[in-house]
Amino acid sequence: MTTQTLSLAQARRVALAAQGLDRPRREGKVTMRQLQGVIDRLGIFQVDSVNVLARAHLMPTFSRLGPYDTGLLERASSTHPRRLVEAVAHEASLVPPETYRHLGFRRSAFATRWFDDDASVLRTHAAEAEEIRQIVTAEGPVTAAEIQTRFESRHPRTGKGWWEWSVAKRILERLFFIGELASAGRTPAFERRYDLPERVLPREVLEAPTPSAEESVRVLVEQAARAHGIGTVRCLGDYFRVKTERVRRAIDELVEDGVLEQVAVEGWKGPTYLHRDAARPRRATGRALLSPFDPLVWERRRLLALFGMHYRIEIYTPAPQRRYGYYTLPFLVGEHVAGRVDLKVDRAARRLLVPAAWAEEDASAETPAELAAELAVLARGLAADEVAGADKGDLARPLRAELAAAGELELVTEA
């Protein structure tokens, strides 16, 4: 059978349509039904403590729906019946409860590793682990800080750094990773609230038969393919961080069953797979700022192959060595990534700060105006009254001029 060949532009549009980024956002109030549409489409929201602009899990919905009541997402992940629960998926993530069930093989692997390891905190502090189980059972949901207050005299915390975990935190995290505990949500300070799975997960998930690892991997790979529309083995495996050999086996089965079709994309090496339900729009007319934690941006090689963008987040790069900025967001216009912009919000002053803005190769003459319009939308979504634009980057000055001309927001010339 002849392998179908797609142009790079066609592949880009397929990917954008699958992610819900191929057309302008609807106007009006965002409802829970619309949020559920994003959940169904993406299947996962990465969780991260970075809060320079907004929490990582809040931004993908904004990129696709525009300003919305973030309480919708909080309710979806913290009140019954939960539409999302936290799991180790693509790093720490919010996923639908059914997806949580299909990540059980990963929790089992963690359990085997840690219970077989004599150096594991679950073995070296077995008595404390049992005490924590009893506390959570009787009092949950609880935070690590609340547990540590009871352990401080016996196991004082030795440091104050973010990763200087207390004994209580180390035990709780291990129990969460292996599925003995679940997350009942996060506090305003972003602390995980640990509880028993039976008090977090829907009954139908708790009572469902345990799937085999092979069945679960197939489900996860199919979800990844549906969310990507088109992708390589690496793309489809990265979505839920599944090992390559397992991904290959699942892809072979999905191809045999007609769920995936092997295709070729002009300029790409190796086999590529198209989901049978993937839309193939002739045009892409959306516009969005994409968080570094957006599913379209996760796999950097995919981003480069689709959009020609070399991208990395520079949070952990020493300031003198940063090229583009601390927290840069790719800026999507139509089917091209036209720029990247370093952003930060000053919540106390209600200001959206733009330390730098840079044009990409596919930037057009309209890019500054498009970016100014998108920043105005973002500012309103963040309850910011003004935009503070700096001079760094080749897109900075034309952007400032567009912001000033628009007159929607007060322009501050120093970020």
Image (cartoon, rainbow, N blue to C red):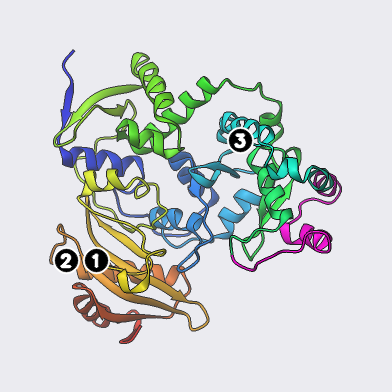
Find disc 3 in the rendering and name its residue: 110
Q: Earlier in the sequence, mark 1 or mark 3?
A: 3
Query: Which sits in the foreground, 340 or 13?
Result: 340
- Circle count: 3
In this rendering, would 308 be left or right of 342? Answer: left
Q: Pick the quarter of the image with the C terminus.
A: bottom left
- Residue at (63% x, 66% y) in the render: 189
Asked whether disc 2 touches disc 1, contact meaning CB atoms under 8 Å apart, the reply is yes
**Range of residues picked out in magenta:** 132-161
The residue lying furthest to the front in this view is 118
Q: CA distance from mark 2 to mark 1?
A: 6 Å
Q: Is residue 157 magenta?
A: yes
In this figure, which residue is indicated by the disc labeled 2?
366
In the rendered image of this protein, does residue 225 appear above or below residue 380? above
Asked whether residue 124 appears in the rendered view, the answer is yes
Point out residue 275 in the picture as x, y percentages from the top left corner.
Answer: 33, 28
The residue sitting at 36% across, 73% down in the picture is 319
Q: Three-letter amino acid code at disc 1?
A: Glu
The label nearer to you, 1 versus 3, is 3
Q: Is residue 34 magenta?
A: no
Res 33 visible: no
Crowding at label 2, few (<14), some or many (≥20) Cα neighbours within 10 Å?
few
